[in-house]
Image (cartoon, grey):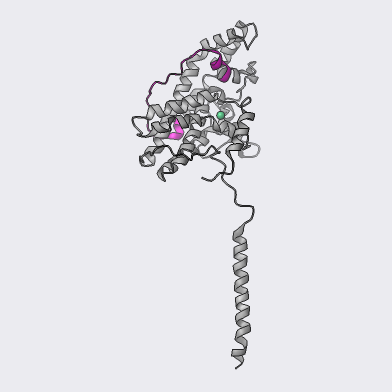
Amino acid sequence: MKKTRTLFMIGVLALLAGASSFGWSGREHYWINLAATIHLEDDMPGINAYGRKLAEMGHLPDLWKGIDPTEGNRHYMDIEDYGYPDPRIDRAHAGLLDPATGRYSPDAGIIPWVILDTLEQLTEAMKTTNWSDAAEIAAAMGHYVGDLHMPLHTTANFNGDLSDNLGVHKRWESEMPRAVRHSRYIEKKPFEYLEDPWSALTNWIIDAHQYIPAIMDADTLATEYAGGDQSSQEYYDLLWEETSPIFAGQRNLAAQHLASLWYTAWINAGRPAIPPLPGDISDDSIFIIEEPDATDYTSWIVLGVFILLALAVIWKSMTARPVASQ
Ligand SMILES: [Zn+2]
């Protein structure tokens, strides 16, 4: 996989993106990627050596939004726009069908297609034993799987604008876990080989979506309880009391389902031996492919060969003429 961007760029963007990006906080992405490697340690020998690195890379796709304008749509899916509660989520079409144009638009979010794409990329990287790419893709997949399990990444009301809960996104996923004491203990949990990853992905996203009303109701209740002060400890304590099973449950499921996806890729790749962690794992976007050089040498080479051939023909005809006249 070829990349155009540099670590320096990522570093600068990390500073810019920190305050504004939506998604589980970096700590949750770290936890989800690390937990998935722990779930798999008995069945994918060698994966343990990758745990910390994959965890550290878990937040990277949020930074890619700063260099790739198409990155944002990869992190969510507003399933109401796909016809929820009877969503038309078609494996063959990434994006919302706009009846006016008859075209699919990515504005409603494309997260399940992105995860399916990373599953294919990961399988191929493992099959060809390109473990640097495999690690990079696996870490990114972990991010998207985490986002898919975050209920507020599955709805058009992602920030509470449509239900008088404005700003709930950051309060629930970032501020709340910072404001309350909670365990980051990782317990080994089961995973499975996925016969039909697409069905699994669509079920997971619909399951995550069912928690939206509970989160909005808890936000309303906690706001009233705290006398309207959504930055108070009272607000966060009650919000946590009401929704911690959803928060921890979805985070745990994300790690289990991520383990299932990594395991599925590894089985489909033929269970290749996992080597020690490579030292050259890139932080760059797995979706930006290096563009061809500005100068297209191919056409110049073709032209040069053509000119040489033409000169050779002319030269031959000039030198042959006296012979022919004899
Ligand atoms: Zn994200």
Looking at the image, which residue is at 62% across and 29% down?
Answer: 15
What percent of the width, then of the height, locates residue 185? 43, 18
Q: Is residue 30 above or below residue 67?
A: above
Answer with left or right where residue 129 lies relative to residue 300.
Answer: left
What percent of the width, then of the height, locates residue 94? 55, 37
Say which quarter of the image contains residue 174: top right
Does residue 71 appear anywhere in the picture? no
Is residue 194 one of those drawn in magenta?
Answer: yes
Is residue 143 one of those drawn in magenta?
Answer: no
Q: Quadrant of ligand 1?
A: top right
In-front residue for pair 198/277:
277
Could you tell me what secondary structure mostly forms the magenta stretch?
Answer: loop
Say which quarter of the image contains residue 154: top right
Q: In this view, does 132 lie above or below 174?
A: below
In this figure, what is the number of numbered marks? 0
In-front residue for pair 98/251:
251
In-front residue for pair 130/262:
130
Q: Is residue 215 above or below residue 309?
A: above
Magenta stretch, residue numbers: 174-200
Does residue 317 appear anywhere in the picture? yes
Say which quarter of the image contains residue 97: top right
What percent of the width, then of the height, locates residue 313? 60, 78
Answer with left or right where residue 190 lies relative to residue 85.
Answer: left
Looking at the image, which residue is at 60% across and 76% down?
Answer: 312
Extreme residue in the bottom direction: 326
* Quadrant for the C terminus in the image: bottom right
What percent of the width, then of the height, locates residue 32? 47, 26
